[in-house]
Image: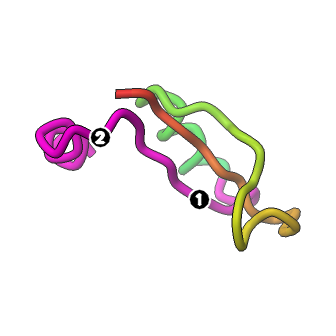
């Protein structure tokens, strides 16, 4: 993830957004430990209760 963040910063991105599944508790814990926080679901995930969208400001 560090390499992805560094590449995003080099390309002037200000944030990273990801989608995961609500049942993937360990993955959500990992993302939160890396600084991501849950945001409202967006786009194709907006009405999917099993989806969880997360964002991290760079």
Farthest residue, direction front: 12
Instruction: Note whether 24 is above or below 8 in the view shown.
Output: below
Left or right: where 25 falls relative to 31 = right
* Viewer-side residue, 50 vs 57: 57
Residue at x 74% of width, y 62% of height:
51
Residue 36 location, x and y as percent? 52, 33
- Residue 2 lies, with reference to residue 41, above or below; the image says above
Which residue position holds label 2?
13
Residue placed most toward the observer, 37 or 29: 37
Residue visible at 42% across and 43% down in the picture: 16
What's the mark number on residue 19? 1
Is 17 covered by the magenta stretch?
A: yes
Q: Which residues are magenta?
A: 1-24
Where residue 38 sits, quadrant-wise, is: top right
Is residue 14 in the magenta section?
yes
Earlier in the chain: of badge 1 and badge 2, it is: 2
Q: Which mark is residue 29?
A: none
Which quadrant would residue 41 be assigned to in this image?
bottom right
Task: Name which residue lies at 20% across and 36% down.
Answer: 9
Please give left or right for residue 46 compared with residue 6 in the image.
right
Q: Quadrant of residue 8?
A: top left
Side of 30 where 6 appears, left or right: left
Residue 3 relative to residue 31: left or right: left
Badge 1 crowding class, 10 Å Cα cut-off, few under 14, some 14 to 19, many 20 or more, is: some
Q: Using the numbered discs, state the Cα–Cα distance from disc 1 to disc 2 in whole angstroms.
A: 18 Å
Residue 17, percent across and down? 50, 48
Nearer the observer, disc 1 or disc 2?
2
Which residue is painted at 75% across and 56% down in the image? 22
Q: Secondary structure at mark 2?
A: loop
- Alpha-carbon neighbours of circle 2 within 10 Å: few (<14), some, or many (≥20)? few
Residue 55 picture location, percent across and down: 54, 39
């Amino acid at each position: 993830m560090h390499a992805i963040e560094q590449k995003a910063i080099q390309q002037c991105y200000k944030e990273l957004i990801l989608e995961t599944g609500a049942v993937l508790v360990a993955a959500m814990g990992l993302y939160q430990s890396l600084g991501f926080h849950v945001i409202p679901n967006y786009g194709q995930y907006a009405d999917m209760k099993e989806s969880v969208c997360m964002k991290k400001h760079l």
